[in-house]
Amino acid sequence: MKKFHFLLLAVVSIILAACSMESPFLENANEGTTGETYKIGFSISTLNNPFFVTLSEGAKENASKQGAEISVIDAQDDASKQAADVEDLIQQGVDLILINPVDSSAIGSAVESANAAGIPVITVDRSTESGKVVAHIASDNVAGGVLAGEYLLEQAGEGAKVAMLEGIAGSSAARDRGEGFLKAVDGKVELVSSLTANFDRGEGLTVMENMLQANPGIEAVFAQNDEMALGALEAIKAANKKIVVIGFDATDDALAKIEAGEMAASVAQKPEEIGKAAIETAVKYLNGETVEEFVPVDLELVKK
């Protein structure tokens, strides 16, 4: 009888030992399911703009923390190149594509190609006019334009002669920022000129020079991004004029000009946070979690 009890205890001990050996394996298996390494492609409009450099760095930093692989491709402000870049990402079989469109209309066909391939798309900072996206990560550009317009009114006063430097025609950011600005100043200022400078500093300089030649009485300028605002400042300085300049993005160069008193203000979009939010949303979606169709990132007006 004692021998039987001894054998029984031995069998139970073996079973318990087996169970204790099995449980760490099960835990690791569960971690592997939730911690899968996703491949994310990011087509960005340009890396020749500090705002988008910071945005991409935010995305890369969070991708590293999330254990995801990210490939950032510079479209160089070329809508045709961006479409080809997205097609390349589709052929590579990435798990998800982030797109910061050069042109909100032109990118539609590339988004539709990703849809057809079953690859989810998230737009960043700028939206697409066609194709299906699972989420859009951006600041409220209309609200940002309103902030700029209200502060311009405060600085220049009603009835002031005002000019606006527009971003890339067809981009949602340019359209929305312009809409918000005009909403704030409509009927309160004289908009003497509104021309495209394609979000570019060099073009901002040239366009501002032309504006000043045609309208030497300009008192305030709203530039739809800081690169154009900085170019406009060079033209204004060369013309020896004192003009209120408000930009958008709050890049380091713009903040330095604000601190020096050369630029009135800039609307801060927090690009690093946009990049981080894009990755967080992408990983959540790939993990099967529900994500919001629009994920907003806070704005603020930066002035001296």
Image: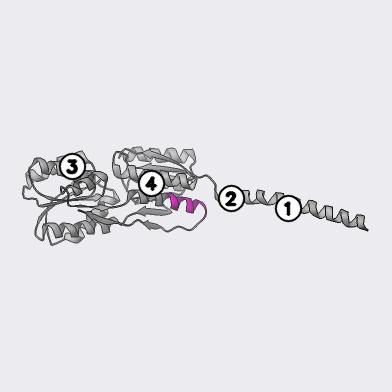
**Mark 4 or 2 closer to N-term?**
2
Cα separation, mark 3 vs mark 4, equals 26 Å
Residue that numbered label 2 is attached to: 31
How many other residues sit within 10 Å of disc 2, few (<14), some (14-19) or many (≥20)?
few
**Mark 3 or 2 closer to N-term?**
2
Q: Residues at badges 2 and 1 in contact (C-beta under 8 Å)?
A: no
Give, as a single range, the part of the protein colored magenta. Answer: 279-288
Q: Which mark is residue 19?
A: 1
Q: Secondary structure at mark 3?
A: helix
Residue at 19 percent across and 40 percent down: it is 203
Residue 294 in view (yes/no): yes
Cα separation, mark 4 vs mark 2, equals 25 Å
Residue that numbered label 4 is attached to: 58
**Mark 1 or 4 closer to N-term?**
1
Q: Secondary structure at mark 2?
A: helix
Residue at 73 percent across and 52 percent down: it is 19
Rendered image quadrant of residue 291 = bottom left
Residue at 29 percent across and 42 percent down: it is 50
Q: Which-is-in-front pick, marks 3 and 4?
A: 4
How many other residues sit within 10 Å of disc 3, few (<14), some (14-19) or many (≥20)?
many
Location of the N terminus by quadrant is bottom right
Residue that numbered label 3 is attached to: 231
Q: Which-is-in-front pick, marks 3 and 2?
A: 2
Q: As shown in the figure, which amino acid type bears the numbered disc 2?
A: Glu
Q: Residues at badges 1 and 4 in contact (C-beta under 8 Å)?
A: no
Q: Residue furthest front?
A: 2
The image position of residue 292, as x and y in percent, is: 42, 59
